[in-house]
Amino acid sequence: MQRRQLEERQRKAEIEAQKDAILRTILTPEARQRLTNVKLVRPELAEAIENQLIALAQSGRIQAQITDDELKQILAQLNSQTRKDYKITIKERGWK
């Protein structure tokens, strides 16, 4: 049982190392830092962006490194698509 868990952890670590290596080549250091910050706040969004960027890089659709400003634009577009608006309604009751 422990051996299986150890192998799974090693496999996940290898995959993460490969992802990190690819992202290091396609993102500028500032963009990588921004993506790391996003990962702290919204890990699912950062994971989706990472996977999308890696897929684009592997298909040859990314020609130059993505800058921080370009990553900001990508994040803004995704945020506007996935953002949820919350409405809080307070109803007065006679509980005084």
Image (tube, helix red, strand yellow):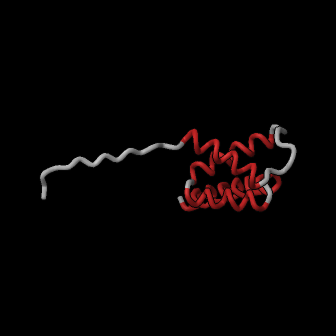
Left or right: 54, with 9 as reference point: right
How many discs appear?
0
Residue 8 placement (x, y as % from top left): 61, 55
Left or right: 91, with 95 as reference point: right
Residue 82 placement (x, y as % from top left): 55, 41
Residue at position x 57%, y 39% in the image: 81
84 lies above or below 39: above
> Looking at the image, can residue 82 be seen?
yes
36 lies above or below 60: below
Residue 7 placement (x, y as % from top left): 63, 57
Q: Quadrant of residue 29?
A: bottom right
Task: Name the quarter where the C terminus is drawn.
Answer: bottom left
In front here: 19 or 61? Answer: 61
Hey, which residue is sitting farthest right in the picture? 63
Q: Quadrant of residue 48?
A: top right
> Looking at the image, can residue 18 be seen?
no
Residue 13 placement (x, y as % from top left): 67, 59
24 lies above or below 50: below
Residue at position x 59%, y 45% in the image: 79
Q: Quadrant of residue 77?
A: top right
Residue at position x 80%, y 43% in the image: 57
In front here: 70 or 35? Answer: 70
In front here: 55 or 9? Answer: 55
